[in-house]
Amino acid sequence: MESYERKQLIYKFVLVIVFVACITAILTFYAAFNCVEQNYFLGTGEISEESTENIETISSALKDFRKLINEYYIGEIDEQKVVDETIKGYVNGLDDEYSEYMTAEEWEEYQINTLGNYVGIGIYMSQDVNKNIVVIEPIEESPAEIAGLKTGDIIVEVNDESVIGQDTATVSAKIKGEEGSTVKLKIIRENQYMDLEVERKAIKVYHVKNKILENNVGYIKLSTFDEGCSSEFENAFRELQSQGAQKLVIDLRDNTGGLVDEALSIADMIVPKDQIMLITKDAKDNKETTTAKQDVLIDMEIVVLVNEYSASASEILVGCLKDHEEATIVGTKTYGKGVIQNVFSLSDGSILKLTTAEYFTPNEIAINKKGIEPHVEVELVEEPEGEEEIDEQLNKALEIINQ
């Protein structure tokens, strides 16, 4: 009987090992945060008495658990992994989908992706409200597009391993690998399971695509607001202008955001100097306004295309142009991400991405969890397999701009 009870005890400890397997985790967490720029993190750099008591309670519990684990647990413990997972769990406890902790390796990978060069399959993906990993869009001519991945596909397995409930950074790391190798994906499309094998290649992400359409209408597709995209946008506009563009369609559909400064730089090309482009409020309700700093560069009729995946920095640009009546917005209601994250570097190279402010349009309209309604709502109807896709949203934009 004693042996049975002992086995049951060990079994229970194994179930909770990820959560409780380190006394050093909170201590490491504390030591690392001493190196954070405290004035940005908590405003005053002070920790509340309630927070101190809470952490002391956690630390005490971890000590008790660690004693039991040291005595009964039969497996090996990867101390660094336990530290990282404990900190991630602590941040996840904020119940904020945009705040996250990244290890030094994860942060390095994130930066590489943001700069637009990596080895992978070439998809934009996001996590929906049900924690599913959803393909936002395959990059044009990428291995993902060639293999048949489509917008809306849900990735449930990578190399026969379930990724249900995992975050985008984790899934992205599993998908990537050496150039020339392949990765197996199981996806759900229209309630049907499909298996795909995709070759990994060096992917170059181009943030901006542009072309001249009929009636001297310029078209710019902006896929993300990564570093340097505002310069690419300006170059694209000047090229279209040299080709005779007199009106402009800006396509922000499926653009899930990026760097706020890049969105504001584009807004600054359109909004008159000294006009408010963005209002932010921090945890203490301090309000800060950002105004246009340069003379107008783009002075022509503009239509902006949006959909339910237009988020964050996209919504900053859309809200600014809508409030100043600088553009007609066409499509469907945007995603509704109206908060800003700051990145804080820790001593070991890891980072904390923390939600520190909420943003509002120039007319002080909240966006978070609400989204922005277009002036003209147009649903994009998916055509049956084998039939030519008709872009009704773009067609409506051209109809409006050519009136």
Image (tube, rainbow, N blue to C red):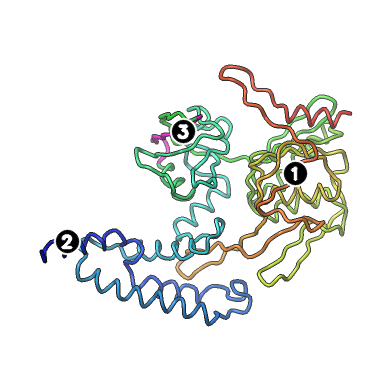
Q: Which amino acid lies under the numbered mark 1 shown in the image of this protein? A: Glu
On the image, which quarter does residue 126 sit in?
top right
- Number of marks in picture: 3
Instruction: Tell me whether circle 3 and circle 1 mark residues in contact (CB < 8 Å).
Output: no
Residue range highlighted in magenta: 178-190
- Residue 354 lies left or right of residue 11; in this view the side is right
On the image, which quarter does residue 241 sit in?
top right
Q: Which amino acid lies under the numbered mark 2 shown in the image of this protein? A: Lys
Sooner in the amino-acid sequence: mark 1 or mark 2: 2
Q: Which amino acid lies under the numbered mark 3 shown in the image of this protein? A: Ile
Crowding at dot 1, Cα within 10 Å, few <14 / some 14-19 / many 20+, comes out as some
As drawn, 121 above or below 54: above
Residue lying farthest to the top in this orientation: 386
Query: Which dot, 3 or 2, sits closer to the camera?
Result: 2
Q: Position of residue 304 (x, y in %)?
A: 77, 39
On the image, which quarter does residue 24 sit in?
bottom left
Q: Residue at x 79, y 32 (%)?
A: 397
Front in this rendered view, residue 171 or 283 = 283
Q: Position of residue 277 (x, y in %)?
A: 80, 56
Crowding at dot 3, Cα within 10 Å, few <14 / some 14-19 / many 20+, comes out as some
Instruction: Tell me whether circle 1 and circle 2 mark residues in contact (CB < 8 Å).
Output: no
Residue that badge 1 annotates? 373
Residue that badge 3 annotates? 188
Front in this rendered view, residue 117 or 151 = 151
Sooner in the amino-acid sequence: mark 3 or mark 1: 3
Q: Residue at x 53, y 67 (%)?
A: 345
Front in this rendered view, residue 314 or 106 = 314
Residue that badge 2 annotates? 7
Disc 2, SS? helix
Sooner in the amino-acid sequence: mark 3 or mark 2: 2
Q: Position of residue 400 (x, y in %)?
A: 84, 31
As drawn, 370 above or below 142: below
